[in-house]
């Protein structure tokens, strides 16, 4: 099929690289543009479970994932004095709870995809991969999309896929301003690498979680025992002045956490020197339609559920598999391909996005008393094998992760 259609993918993250890999496997020539100068390493841990794991298996990613996966065995909730108050092992919900059987850093999963792209055989579609490049303008007619890039280059494409994340520039350019589609859910989240705090005393593979009023602090050990990942979420009204102002973001975190116990002083001391500090809104994206003409959105650009759902990577992988599959099945009928992609994925997206605001509130009690009540509640109900809470969480997890996948013929012979 090489040469029959040309597809542009905007965004070299997990969604963009996954859809590019599958398009190439179908013999479709693909260009990928990524604004960053190089792949972004590290990042938050993401998990594979249910249908997203099945997609990874169908795409041949599991050997690479297994080599890079994190040793995460569960979560332990710790009070200000460093005492363990509740434990949530990964096997508690059959590997489908807050910590899954397979966890991997976002950067490592992206590198697995890039390795598969680099190792593609000659019969795949042709690839043009450009770092430090992005779309600066586009116009469409009945036959193609004319794209002007930031470098000044221009080219025609049959289809354009926007996989450029929550703050998608392509979405704003084609569909309208972000305010039309994004909903702030009441919190901000940040994460960054720190030297492992002395005296933390976490067991191998366990994520430590500490609750303070309106905020949560988690520490995830890295494969290198000398470093860990700090993950901090805090509830505040939306504050547009925080966007892009790292100093203000770090002041907010310090103000919220200063004076609390466990290893928070060590985390705050390390924050300013962190090489990979990230901070952003907990935001949901809802769009009435994910495509317009020859342009279609994928992943967080179209249907971000927020980091609180734990399903962002799952939706990115499943969405990429479905979108590439539908394009490969009907490469000359892009409207049908886009409609089928949305028809198949929309029910899962709707399920994932349910109740996120309530989840933000429940995870972040406003007072010390609220924190104490939540810890006591978790200590009791997580310790009971037949707890109705555990049964409910299992049902909710299954509803979000067990999703029937079509088997696309253009990919079957390449697995």
Image: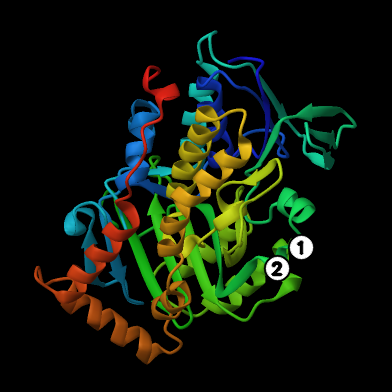
As helix, strand or loop, the secondary structure at mark 1 comes to loop
**Which residue is identified by label 2?**
180
Farthest residue to the top: give it.
122
Determine whether, in the image, residue 265 is placed left or right of residue 144.
left
- Nearer the observer, 231 or 298: 298
Quarter placement of the C terminus = top left
Tell me which residue sits at (36%, 32%) in the image. Answer: 407
Residue 29 rendering spot, x and y as whole percentages: 64, 21
Determine whether, in the image, residue 189 is placed left or right of residue 242.
left
Can residue 41 be seen in this snapshot? no
Determine whether, in the image, residue 381 is placed left or right of residue 325.
left
Residue 155 rendering spot, x and y as whole percentages: 82, 27
Q: Residues within 10 Å of mark 2 (few under 14, many from 20)?
A: few
Residue 11 rendering spot, x and y as whole percentages: 65, 40
- Nearer the observer, 143 or 212: 143
In the figure, 312 relative to 411: above or below? below
Can residue 187 be seen in this snapshot? yes
Tell me which residue sits at (37%, 22%) in the image. Answer: 412
As helix, strand or loop, the secondary structure at mark 2 comes to helix
Residue 139 rendering spot, x and y as whole percentages: 84, 41
How many marks the image carries: the answer is: 2
Q: Are marks 2 and 1 in contact (CB under 8 Å)?
A: yes
């Amino acid at each position: 099929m090489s040469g029959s259609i040309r597809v542009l993918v905007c965004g070299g993250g997990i969604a963009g690289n996954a859809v590019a890999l599958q398009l190439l496997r179908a013999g479709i020539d693909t260009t990928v543009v990524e604004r960053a100068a190089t792949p972004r390493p590290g990042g938050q841990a993401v998990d594979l479970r249910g249908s997203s794991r099945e997609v990874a298996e169908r795409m041949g990613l599991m050997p690479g994932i297994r080599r890079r996966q994190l040793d995460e065995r569960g979560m332990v909730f710790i009070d200000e004095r460093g005492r363990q108050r509740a434990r949530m092992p990964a096997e508690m919900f059959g590997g489908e709870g807050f910590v899954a059987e397979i966890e991997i850093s976002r950067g490592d999963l992206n590198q697995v995809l890039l390795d598969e792209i680099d190792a593609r055989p000659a019969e795949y579609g042709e690839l043009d991969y450009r770092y430090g490049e992005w779309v600066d303008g586009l116009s469409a007619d009945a036959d193609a999309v004319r794209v002007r890039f930031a470098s000044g280059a221009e080219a025609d494409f049959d289809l354009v896929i926007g996989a450029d994340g929550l703050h998608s520039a392509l979405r704003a350019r084609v569909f309208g301003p972000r305010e039309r589609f994004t909903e702030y859910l009441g919190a901000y989240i940040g994460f960054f690498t720190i030297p492992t705090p002395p005296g933390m005393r976490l067991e191998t593979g366990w994520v430590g979680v500490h609750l303070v009023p309106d905020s949560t602090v988690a520490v995830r050990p890295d494969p290198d025992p000398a470093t860990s990942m700090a993950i901090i979420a805090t509830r505040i009204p939306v504050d547009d002045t925080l966007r892009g102002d790292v100093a203000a973001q770090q002041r907010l975190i310090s103000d919220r956490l200063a004076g609390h116990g466990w290893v928070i002083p060590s985390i705050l001391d390390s924050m300013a020197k962190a090489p990979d500090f990230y901070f952003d809104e907990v935001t949901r994206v809802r769009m009435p339609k994910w495509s317009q003409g020859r342009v279609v959105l994928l992943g967080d650009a179209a249907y971000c559920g927020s980091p609180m759902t734990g399903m962002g990577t799952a939706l990115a992988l499943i969405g990429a598999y479905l979108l590439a599959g539908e394009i490969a099945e009907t490469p000359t009928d892009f409207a049908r391909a886009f409609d089928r992609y949305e028809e198949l994925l929309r029910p899962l997206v709707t399920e994932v996005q349910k109740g996120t605001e309530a989840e933000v509130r429940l995870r972040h009690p406003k007072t010390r008393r609220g924190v104490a009540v939540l810890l006591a509640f978790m200590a009791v109900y997580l310790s009971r094998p037949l707890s109705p809470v555990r049964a409910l969480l299992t049902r909710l997890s299954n509803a979000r992760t067990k999703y029937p996948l079509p088997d696309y013929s253009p990919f079957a012979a390449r697995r």
